[in-house]
Amino acid sequence: MRILLSLFLFITCNQDLYAQVFRIKNGHVYFHSEATKELVSASSNDISGVIDISKKLFAFRVPLVSFFGFNNPLQQEHFNENYMESELYPDAFFVGKIIENVDVNFDSEYIIRAKGKLKIHGVEQERIIKAIVSIKNRVINVHSDFPVLLADYNIKIPRIVYEKIATEVSVTVNAVFEKKK
Protein backbone atom coordinates (compact mmCIF):
# COMPACT_ATOMS: atom_id res chain seq x y z
CA MET A 1 0.00 0.00 0.00
CA ARG A 2 1.94 2.94 -1.35
CA ILE A 3 -0.09 5.62 0.45
CA LEU A 4 0.63 4.07 3.84
CA LEU A 5 4.35 3.77 3.17
CA SER A 6 4.49 7.33 1.85
CA LEU A 7 2.68 8.65 4.91
CA PHE A 8 4.94 6.76 7.33
CA LEU A 9 8.08 7.93 5.50
CA PHE A 10 6.87 11.52 5.26
CA ILE A 11 6.00 11.70 8.95
CA THR A 12 9.16 9.90 10.04
CA CYS A 13 11.51 12.01 7.94
CA ASN A 14 9.96 15.47 8.37
CA GLN A 15 11.40 17.07 11.54
CA ASP A 16 8.97 20.03 11.45
CA LEU A 17 5.95 17.83 12.12
CA TYR A 18 7.18 16.19 15.33
CA ALA A 19 5.09 18.45 17.55
CA GLN A 20 1.85 17.15 16.04
CA VAL A 21 2.72 13.53 15.21
CA PHE A 22 1.48 10.83 17.54
CA ARG A 23 2.22 7.09 17.38
CA ILE A 24 0.36 4.19 18.89
CA LYS A 25 1.89 3.31 22.24
CA ASN A 26 -0.48 0.39 22.67
CA GLY A 27 -3.63 -0.74 21.01
CA HIS A 28 -6.13 -3.52 20.74
CA VAL A 29 -8.33 -4.70 17.87
CA TYR A 30 -11.19 -7.10 18.58
CA PHE A 31 -13.68 -8.66 16.19
CA HIS A 32 -16.63 -10.95 16.61
CA SER A 33 -18.93 -12.72 14.25
CA GLU A 34 -22.14 -14.02 15.74
CA ALA A 35 -23.84 -16.48 13.42
CA THR A 36 -26.76 -18.83 14.03
CA LYS A 37 -24.63 -21.76 15.16
CA GLU A 38 -21.28 -20.31 16.21
CA LEU A 39 -19.55 -17.30 17.69
CA VAL A 40 -16.15 -16.43 16.25
CA SER A 41 -14.08 -13.83 18.03
CA ALA A 42 -10.44 -12.91 18.30
CA SER A 43 -8.22 -9.97 19.11
CA SER A 44 -4.81 -8.52 18.36
CA ASN A 45 -2.52 -6.24 20.32
CA ASP A 46 -0.24 -5.84 17.30
CA ILE A 47 -1.64 -2.62 15.86
CA SER A 48 0.64 0.11 14.61
CA GLY A 49 -0.26 3.56 13.47
CA VAL A 50 0.36 7.28 13.36
CA ILE A 51 -1.77 10.39 13.48
CA ASP A 52 -0.54 13.73 12.21
CA ILE A 53 -2.86 16.17 13.96
CA SER A 54 -1.61 19.22 12.04
CA LYS A 55 -2.31 17.58 8.66
CA LYS A 56 -5.33 15.57 9.96
CA LEU A 57 -3.83 12.38 8.46
CA PHE A 58 -3.73 8.88 9.90
CA ALA A 59 -2.51 5.40 9.00
CA PHE A 60 -3.12 2.08 10.81
CA ARG A 61 -1.92 -1.48 10.16
CA VAL A 62 -2.80 -4.81 11.77
CA PRO A 63 -1.10 -8.08 10.79
CA LEU A 64 -3.86 -10.67 10.37
CA VAL A 65 -1.82 -13.56 11.78
CA SER A 66 -1.55 -11.61 15.06
CA PHE A 67 -5.18 -12.37 15.98
CA PHE A 68 -5.52 -14.78 18.92
CA GLY A 69 -8.21 -16.06 21.28
CA PHE A 70 -10.26 -18.09 18.82
CA ASN A 71 -12.48 -20.83 20.25
CA ASN A 72 -10.05 -23.46 19.01
CA PRO A 73 -6.92 -23.80 16.83
CA LEU A 74 -8.96 -25.02 13.85
CA GLN A 75 -11.01 -21.81 13.87
CA GLN A 76 -7.79 -19.76 13.80
CA GLU A 77 -6.41 -21.89 10.96
CA HIS A 78 -9.59 -21.42 8.90
CA PHE A 79 -9.54 -17.67 9.59
CA ASN A 80 -5.98 -17.32 8.27
CA GLU A 81 -6.00 -19.90 5.48
CA ASN A 82 -9.56 -20.03 4.11
CA TYR A 83 -11.16 -16.67 4.77
CA MET A 84 -8.49 -13.98 5.16
CA GLU A 85 -5.83 -15.78 3.08
CA SER A 86 -3.21 -14.20 5.33
CA GLU A 87 -0.27 -15.39 3.24
CA LEU A 88 -1.54 -13.44 0.22
CA TYR A 89 -2.98 -10.50 2.20
CA PRO A 90 -0.99 -10.33 5.45
CA ASP A 91 -2.26 -6.98 6.78
CA ALA A 92 -5.38 -4.89 7.18
CA PHE A 93 -4.91 -1.14 6.66
CA PHE A 94 -6.92 2.00 7.28
CA VAL A 95 -5.40 5.18 5.84
CA GLY A 96 -7.00 8.57 5.42
CA LYS A 97 -7.97 11.89 6.86
CA ILE A 98 -9.74 13.08 10.02
CA ILE A 99 -12.74 15.20 9.05
CA GLU A 100 -13.18 17.21 12.29
CA ASN A 101 -10.60 19.40 14.02
CA VAL A 102 -8.86 18.03 17.10
CA ASP A 103 -6.84 20.17 19.52
CA VAL A 104 -4.36 18.15 21.57
CA ASN A 105 -3.37 21.15 23.71
CA PHE A 106 -6.48 20.85 25.89
CA ASP A 107 -7.96 17.89 27.71
CA SER A 108 -11.20 17.14 25.92
CA GLU A 109 -13.31 14.54 24.16
CA TYR A 110 -14.39 14.56 20.53
CA ILE A 111 -16.60 12.45 18.33
CA ILE A 112 -14.84 12.44 14.99
CA ARG A 113 -15.20 10.84 11.59
CA ALA A 114 -12.22 9.26 9.90
CA LYS A 115 -12.54 9.08 6.12
CA GLY A 116 -10.21 6.80 4.26
CA LYS A 117 -9.55 3.51 2.57
CA LEU A 118 -10.01 0.36 4.60
CA LYS A 119 -8.04 -2.43 2.94
CA ILE A 120 -8.82 -6.02 3.91
CA HIS A 121 -8.22 -9.19 1.92
CA GLY A 122 -6.62 -7.14 -0.88
CA VAL A 123 -9.76 -5.02 -1.40
CA GLU A 124 -9.91 -1.29 -0.66
CA GLN A 125 -13.21 0.29 0.28
CA GLU A 126 -13.79 3.97 0.97
CA ARG A 127 -15.17 4.23 4.51
CA ILE A 128 -16.18 6.86 7.00
CA ILE A 129 -15.73 5.46 10.49
CA LYS A 130 -16.77 7.28 13.65
CA ALA A 131 -14.51 7.31 16.67
CA ILE A 132 -14.41 8.79 20.16
CA VAL A 133 -11.16 10.65 20.76
CA SER A 134 -10.24 11.52 24.35
CA ILE A 135 -7.26 13.74 25.10
CA LYS A 136 -5.65 13.99 28.52
CA ASN A 137 -2.17 15.39 29.15
CA ARG A 138 -1.45 15.32 25.39
CA VAL A 139 -2.11 11.56 25.25
CA ILE A 140 -4.75 10.57 22.71
CA ASN A 141 -7.14 7.67 23.34
CA VAL A 142 -9.18 6.46 20.38
CA HIS A 143 -12.15 4.10 20.55
CA SER A 144 -14.19 2.95 17.56
CA ASP A 145 -16.82 0.31 16.85
CA PHE A 146 -17.77 -0.42 13.24
CA PRO A 147 -19.15 -3.22 11.06
CA VAL A 148 -17.34 -4.96 8.21
CA LEU A 149 -19.40 -6.76 5.58
CA LEU A 150 -17.46 -9.79 4.35
CA ALA A 151 -18.91 -9.49 0.84
CA ASP A 152 -17.46 -5.95 0.52
CA TYR A 153 -13.98 -7.47 0.80
CA ASN A 154 -14.53 -10.58 -1.33
CA ILE A 155 -14.35 -12.88 1.69
CA LYS A 156 -16.31 -15.95 0.66
CA ILE A 157 -18.26 -18.16 3.05
CA PRO A 158 -18.67 -21.75 1.82
CA ARG A 159 -22.29 -22.91 1.91
CA ILE A 160 -21.39 -25.79 4.24
CA VAL A 161 -20.42 -23.36 7.05
CA TYR A 162 -22.87 -20.56 6.22
CA GLU A 163 -24.67 -20.88 9.58
CA LYS A 164 -21.35 -20.72 11.46
CA ILE A 165 -19.97 -17.49 9.94
CA ALA A 166 -21.87 -14.19 10.03
CA THR A 167 -21.86 -12.06 6.89
CA GLU A 168 -21.17 -8.98 9.01
CA VAL A 169 -18.33 -8.78 11.52
CA SER A 170 -18.24 -6.25 14.37
CA VAL A 171 -14.85 -4.62 14.94
CA THR A 172 -13.70 -2.67 18.00
CA VAL A 173 -10.48 -0.67 18.07
CA ASN A 174 -8.89 0.93 21.13
CA ALA A 175 -5.58 2.73 20.82
CA VAL A 176 -3.43 5.02 22.94
CA PHE A 177 -1.25 7.52 21.07
CA GLU A 178 1.69 9.44 22.44
CA LYS A 179 3.62 12.27 20.89
CA LYS A 180 6.45 11.09 18.69
CA LYS A 181 9.84 11.89 20.18
Image: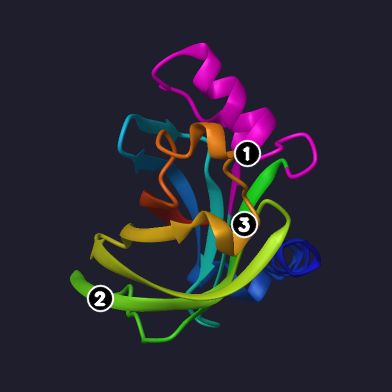
Q: Of 25 and 68, which appears nearest the observer? A: 68
Q: Which segment did they paint magenta? A: 61-89
Is 118 displayed left or right of 133 in the figure? Answer: right
Looking at this view, name the residue that lies furthest to the left.
108
Which numbered dot is residue 111?
Answer: 2
Local packing at callout 1 (Cα closer than 10 Å; few below 14, some 14-19, many 20+) is: some
Looking at this view, name the residue that lies furthest to the bottom.
100
Which numbered dot is residue 145?
Answer: none
Q: CA distance from mark 3 to mark 1?
A: 17 Å
Q: Residue at x 55, y 39 (%)?
A: 159
Q: Nearer the viewer, mark 3 or mark 2?
A: 3
Q: Amino acid at mark 3?
A: Phe
User: What residue would you read off at disc 3?
Assistant: 93
Q: Is residue 157 visible?
A: yes
Q: Are marks 3 and 1 in contact (CB under 8 Å)?
A: no
In the picture, which quadrant includes the N terminus?
A: bottom right
Q: Of 148 and 91, which appears nearest the observer? A: 148
In the image, is residue 84 part of the stretch drawn in magenta?
yes
Mark 3 residue element: strand
Q: Is residue 1 above or below residue 79?
A: below
Expressed as whole percent of the image width and height from the top left, the position of residue 104 reads 33, 73
Q: Amino acid at mark 1?
A: Tyr
Q: Residue at x 19, y 71 (%)?
A: 109
Q: Amino acid at mark 2?
A: Ile
User: What residue would you read off at disc 1?
Assistant: 83
Q: Are marks 3 and 2 in contact (CB under 8 Å)?
A: no
Q: Nearer the viewer, mark 1 or mark 2?
A: 1
Q: CA distance from mark 3 to mark 2?
A: 21 Å
